[in-house]
Image: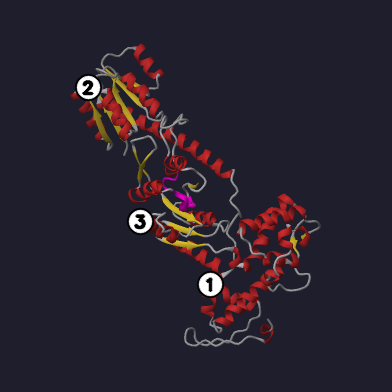
Amino acid sequence: MARVLVIDDNDTLREGMAATVRRMNHEVYTASSGSEGLALFKKQGADFVITDLKMDGMTGMAVLESIRELDATVPTLIVTAFGSVETAVEAMRLGALDFLQKPFAPEVLRLKVQRGLEVRNERFARVRAEAEVEALRSDAATSYGFGELVGRSPSMQAVFQLIEKVAARNVPVHIHGESGTGKELVARALHMHSLRREKAFVKVNCGALTESLLESELFGHEKGSFTGAVKRKLGRFELAHEGTLFLDEVGDMSAGLQVKLLRVLQEREFERVGGEETVKVDVRVISATHRDLKSEVQAGRFREDLYYRMHVVSCNVPPLREHREDIPLLVEHFIKKQAPRLNAGITAISPDALARLCGYDWPGNVRELQNAMDQALVFAEGSRIEIDALPPAFRQAASKNLLPLPSGDRTLPEILDDLERQLILRAYEETKGIKTETARKLGIKTSALYYKLEKYGIGVIAGREGGGEEAATTTENVKE
């Protein structure tokens, strides 16, 4: 259903045209003068405008020019009882879609309206596509850290399980984690596994913009609403219509914008900066921050009602120092991803160099690890990364943090297998050999655990599941 504005100072003709359009199942509002019609357009907008040519005060030509200035995507149909070729040519020159001479049959008006709405959809799609391309170019110019979520640790498996469980649910999700942990990757994964995956994923960094710029970025603005606003701009909420909007560092948002965000989440509508037209949207909002929002609420810096609106589901992304067992896997991932571009001869990392990376505290998390790997790949020689290729800060990593890596000249896949085996054995011992509990603790399926137990030669003598399962490890598994 579209919105059609009919402007005519003749009551009978105006209501007749309105009735014809309503029978097409469109929303219609009317005005008896050009100035009244323009005021309605500024307040409510329209998808198509029908205006009489000759009216007292503001003429149809003036209405046409004003609407074209406000929104060039809206087609206008000029109708008049005093038509001429010169008038029709002038109307088309000023941007009118068509020119219709009174009297005319309802069928003719219906065809004009149908064509006008098709043109409106085509124009708006073009404008939206241009805005999306501009937004994507802006996003592409920014480095977002590692390329995909990677991890075998229980804490990362818990993140994956949450994504799988809530992605298809159309609920707001709040992601908490330190800078560089991969909050945006979690947001993208939620979008790609949702029912909105065919629509846009749009990102806004709330901490990188001033309040006025952020308001314009979120809600868009009308032409002339402030200095430099030379044309209408669609905001990120409009670009994300029927898709997902990711609000990164939402904890940095000002109190004034928090109120406007709350309204969008509650009512699913807003007005552009400098505009009166109410824009309705269907957007799933995913937010993220490195701040403790509960503390921010208690301190009065973040609205409590907005906090609960965004925290329908909460996801915590752990810092890298809390899942060091994933470092070898991440290192392998970065070598495969970055080596072809930075140093094609590198295929592995030495155990000693890997141990240094595992022993570092990683205040910058996975983003810092990627940066370190990029540098190491640039300076590495031969076929693998050695300690001397690592950035200086990583060469002297504290020995207290080192993971117990196997000795000898082993390949990275062999090292990863050893670490995985250690993790499984640790969980297996903690759960006293109960396979379902072991699988749950590791964040994997029971069938996958059976496979890994067999792979690593961890022998199991099982009793009844859940009723006192007993387990015994082979002699080969005792040595750890």
Q: Which residue is mark 2?
A: 9
Q: Residues within 10 Å of mark 1 (few under 14, many from 20)?
A: few
Alpha carbons under labels 3 and 2: distance apart: 48 Å
**Distance CA(mark 2)–CA(mark 1):** 73 Å
Frontmost residue, 113 versus 176: 176
The mark closer to the camera, 3 or 2, is 3
Residue 28 image-quadrant placement: top left
Q: Residue furthest right?
A: 382
As displayed, is residue 99 above or below residue 208?
above
**Left or right placement of residue 11 versus residue 356 in this view:** left
Range shown magenta: 239-253
Helix, strand, or loop for circle 1?
A: loop
Q: Which residue is mark 1?
A: 445
Q: Which mark is residue 382?
A: none
Residue 56 to residue 242: above or below: above
Q: Pointer 3 and pointer 2: residues touching (CB < 8 Å)?
A: no
Q: Is residue 311 visible?
A: no
| Residue 463, percent from left and from top | 52, 88
Residue 60 magenta: no
Specify the quadrant of the image occupied by residue 35: top left
Rendered view: 167 above or below 153? above
| Amino acid on which disc 3 is placed | Asp
- In which quadrant is the C terminus drawn? bottom right
